[in-house]
Image (tube, helix red, strand yellow):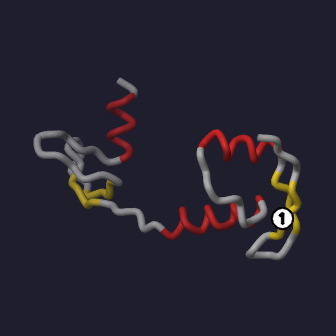
Amino acid sequence: MTFTDRTMVCQDCGAEFVFTVGEQEFYSEKGFKNEPKRCNDCRKSRKAERRSARPKKTFTVVCEACGVETQVPFEPKDGRPVYCRACFDNQRSK
């Protein structure tokens, strides 16, 4: 299949952008069926919005080393020690 650069219009901002031969070949190799509908700037903006919209779940724990209550970004497992940031860094540097 032969590809040629194609000028397209972004569905978000209305700006024209080029769907290059290289991009088309990449889409074809990956088996993507849909062509891009947004320019690079709008794609980056949309991706950043989705990333920031996800709430980060944290768990409150008591540090095994110093006893301070702290938040961690993972669910602690039974029998495994959990440390605050300072104690974790201290443990790692040993």
- Frontmost residue, 66 versus 76: 76
Residue 7 x, y percent position in the rendering: 88, 61
Q: Quadrant of residue 49?
A: bottom right
Residue 17 lies, with reference to residue 12, above or below; the image says above
Residue 19 x, y percent position in the rendering: 81, 54
Residue 75 x, y percent position in the rendering: 25, 53
Residue with the most extreme top position: 94
- Frontmost residue, 66 versus 31: 31
Residue 78 lies, with reference to residue 71, above or below; the image says above
Q: As drawn, is 3 to the left or to the right of 83? A: right
Considering the numbered disc 1 on the image, is that residue within a helix, a strand or a loop?
Answer: strand
Residue with the most extreme left position: 79
Residue 51 x, y percent position in the rendering: 54, 62
Q: Quadrant of residue 8?
A: bottom right
Type of amino acid under label 1: Met
Circle 1 residue: 8
Residue at x-position 41% and y-position 63% = 56
Residue at x-position 86% and y-position 56% = 6
Q: As drawn, is 23 to the left or to the right of 70? A: right
Residue at x-position 42% and y-position 68% = 55
Number of residues whose C-alpha sits closer than 10 Å to that of mark 1, classed few (under 14), some (14–19) or many (20 or more):
some
Q: As drawn, is 53 to the left or to the right of 48? A: left
Q: As drawn, is 41 to the left or to the right of 32? A: right
Q: Count the marks: how many?
A: 1
